[in-house]
Image (cartoon, helix red, strand yellow):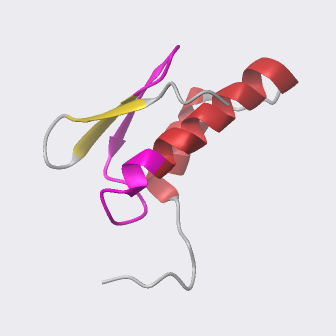
Amino acid sequence: VINKCKCFEENSNELIFVSGKHSYYAFGLGLEGDHQWQNACTAIDLAESLREYFDFQISDSAINKGLKNAKHKGRLEW
C-alpha cells in the first residue's frame, strides 16, 4: 500500500483526509491523539486498496463512519 493520504485540520474539530481519489471529512476521530491522524490515513489507504485491487465493497460513507467511531477497548485514555 502506497501512503497517498494526507490529513489537514480545517478547524479545531474538523479534519479533512485527502487520498489519491477521495476526500473524507471527520469531526474528530474516535481515538485521541494527534498521532491518530497518521493511523487514520493508513486505514483509508488500506480500505481504498482493498476496494481497488480486491473488489471489497467499502463505501466512502463507511470510511467516514469508521473514522468517527473507531474504538480500542482497553486502551489507556485520559
Q: Residue furthest left?
A: 11
Whether the magenta-drawn stretch holds residue 78 is answered as no
Residue at 35% of width from left, 66% of height from top? 32
Comparing 67 with 33, the one in front is: 33
In percent of width and height, residue 47 lies at 67, 35
Q: Is residue 46 above or below residue 37?
A: above
**Quarter of the image with the C terminus in it:** bottom left
Name the side, left or right, on which 11 lies relative to 52: left
Q: Is residue 17 above or below residue 75?
A: above
Whether the magenta-drawn stretch holds residue 20 is answered as yes
Q: Is residue 62 above or below residue 59?
A: below
The segment highlighted magenta reads 18-38
Residue at 51% of width from left, 16% of height from top? 20
Find residue 3 and report its image quarter: top right
In percent of width and height, residue 27 lies at 30, 46
Residue at 44% of width from left, 52% of height from top? 68
Find residue 60 and report its image quarter: top right
Q: Residue furthest front?
A: 2
In percent of width and height, residue 37 lies at 38, 48
Residue at 56% of width from left, 36% of height from top? 44
In percent of width and height, residue 14 lies at 24, 42
**Quarter of the image with the N terminus in it:** top right
Q: Residue furthest top?
A: 21
Find residue 62 and report its image quarter: top right
Marker count (numbered):
0
Comparing 55 with 65, the one in front is: 55
Q: Is residue 37 above or below residue 16?
A: below
